[in-house]
Image (spheres, rainbow, N blue to C red):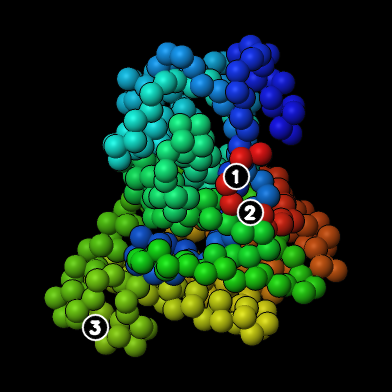
């Protein structure tokens, strides 16, 4: 891959100079959805699919971007003195946002770059192609300009740029998983403190299967920001009756005891999901450590029901995929993963039933929706790195 992309880079921008190659993975979250901006725990893992980047410094302050995924746009030219969001700029708003955020943090970018990008994450699938591109850009800037910044800080800068440059009020999970992932491990992250530990994902005779509904979503344009606002409203009302910093501070019992303080019934359900999902995530990681894959699967299923009914971030097609999975022998657990409103499901499926899973669900989904689902039997990979 590196050689092929470097060759394309030279074809576009000419040879010579110090051409460097990088990779940042996408992620799938096994459990712990919409808890990352509510002060809770998440349990994502980095994938072996992600975003590749080839870059070389320039002597001026010009920026040139090219993506093999959006080759119809050709080379997009801008400059380090023109880092403002622009609808016409399309995908380049993500790397530009990270550059803007680096400069906001006081890290000077002295000269421009020629950049080639290629991603093998399906666009709009909910596997964090945008966070992957942000972390990739952060790693490039750190390495090329010799900026002394940790990979945790790279993740935080990526989140800051998505919140403030691209307008999606996301939490830290996606960028953190891409920056800090570890092969064959998921990251058990406390999003409030950023304390984390790696937990081996030993599924014995099972595989992680991601099913792409092919229903595309855009978190910026969706109700994602509404969910965050509703959660914050619930938190403010709870703080009047109990001393907490985040919804993640509450146990289920404490929530039930004080939930009447939340006047709006919709906000109450949003808060219920955040509290119960956080506790489910803690229990799920413990189950994995105890090799209790069946319990892990039941908690995944409960997570989906909560997102469908209390947080309302699912949709008809995703619910269908999950319900089809629940009916099949060999499926240990299945749920929506990612921001919601389309995208993907994640399932744990016994190895000897994976082919049946793909064939049966693919056929039923096509017949009922007219959409062609895509299936990825995934491996857990390392976080962002130079190639």
Kindly report which numbered mark, 2 or 3, lies closer to the viewer in this rendering. Answer: 2
Q: Secondary structure at mark 2?
A: loop
Q: Is residue 61 above or below residue 22?
A: above
Q: Earlier in the sequence, mark 2 or mark 3?
A: 3
The disc placed on residue 258 is: 3
Q: Residues within 10 Å of mark 1 (few under 14, many from 20)?
A: many
Q: Tell me the quarter of the image containing the C terminus.
A: top right
Residue 50 location, quadrant: top right
**Which residue, given by chain and number where applicable, does mark 2 sit on?**
382
In 3D space, how far apart are the residues under numbered discs 2 and 1 (Cα atoms)?
Answer: 8 Å
Q: Is residue 345 visible?
A: no
Q: CA distance from mark 2 to mark 3?
A: 42 Å
Residue 156: x %, y % from top left: 39, 50
Residue drawn at (40%, 63%), measured in percent from left and top? 194
The residue at the point 74 percent across, 28 percent down is 3
**Identity of the residue drawn at 60% across and 71% down:** 199
- Asked whether the viewer can see residue 55, the reply is yes
Q: Residue furthest left?
A: 240
The foreground one among 44 and 149 is 149
Residue at figure coordinates x 41%, y 77% from the top left:
276
Q: SS class of the residue under badge 3?
A: helix
Q: Would you name the residue on which mark 1 appears?
A: 385
- Using residue 248 as the reference point, say whether residue 70 is left or right of it: right
Residue closer to the observer: 243 or 362? 243
| Image quadrant where residue 109 sits | top left
């Amino acid at each position: 891959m590196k050689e092929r992309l470097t060759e394309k880079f030279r074809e576009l921008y000419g040879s010579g100079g110090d051409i460097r190659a990088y990779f940042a993975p996408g992620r799938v979250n096994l459990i712990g959805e919409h808890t990352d901006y509510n002060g809770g725990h998440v349990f994502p893992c980095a994938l072996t699919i992600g975003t590749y980047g080839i870059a070389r410094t320039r002597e001026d302050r010009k920026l040139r971007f090219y993506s093999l995924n959006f080759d119809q746009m050709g080379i997009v030219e801008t400059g380090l003195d023109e880092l403002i969001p622009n609808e016409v700029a399309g995908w380049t708003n993500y790397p530009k946002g990270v550059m803007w955020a680096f400069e906001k943090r006081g890290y000077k970018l002295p000269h421009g770059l020629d950049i080639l990008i290629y991603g093998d994450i399906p666009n709009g699938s909910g596997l964090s192609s945008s966070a992957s591109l942000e972390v990739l850009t952060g790693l490039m800037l750190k390495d090329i300009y010799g900026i002394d910044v940790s990979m945790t800080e790279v993740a935080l800068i990526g989140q800051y740029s998505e919140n403030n440059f691209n307008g999606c009020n996301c939490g830290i999970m996606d960028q953190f998983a891409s920056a800090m992932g570890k092969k064959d491990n998921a990251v058990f992250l406390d999003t409030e403190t950023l304390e984390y530990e790696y937990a081996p994902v030993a599924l014995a005779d099972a595989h992680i299967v991601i099913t792409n509904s092919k229903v595309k979503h855009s978190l910026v344009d969706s109700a994602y920001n509404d969910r965050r606002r509703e959660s914050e409203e619930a938190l403010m009302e709870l703080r009047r009756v109990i001393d907490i910093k985040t919804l993640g501070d509450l146990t289920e019992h404490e929530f039930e005891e004080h939930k009447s303080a939340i006047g709006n019934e919709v906000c109450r359900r949003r808060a219920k999901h955040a509290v119960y999902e956080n506790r489910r995530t803690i229990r799920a990681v413990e189950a994995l450590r105890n090799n209790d894959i069946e319990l892990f699967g039941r908690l995944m299923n409960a997570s989906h029901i909560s997102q469908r009914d209390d947080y309302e971030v699912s949709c008809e097609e995703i619910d269908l995929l999950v319900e089809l999975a629940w009916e099949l022998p060999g499926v240990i657990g299945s749920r929506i993963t990612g921001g919601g409103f389309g995208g993907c499901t994640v399932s744990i499926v016994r190895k000897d039933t994976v082919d049946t899973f793909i064939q049966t669900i693919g056929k039923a989904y096509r017949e009922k929706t007219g959409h062609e689902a895509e299936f990825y039997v995934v491996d857990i990979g390392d976080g962002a790195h130079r190639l």
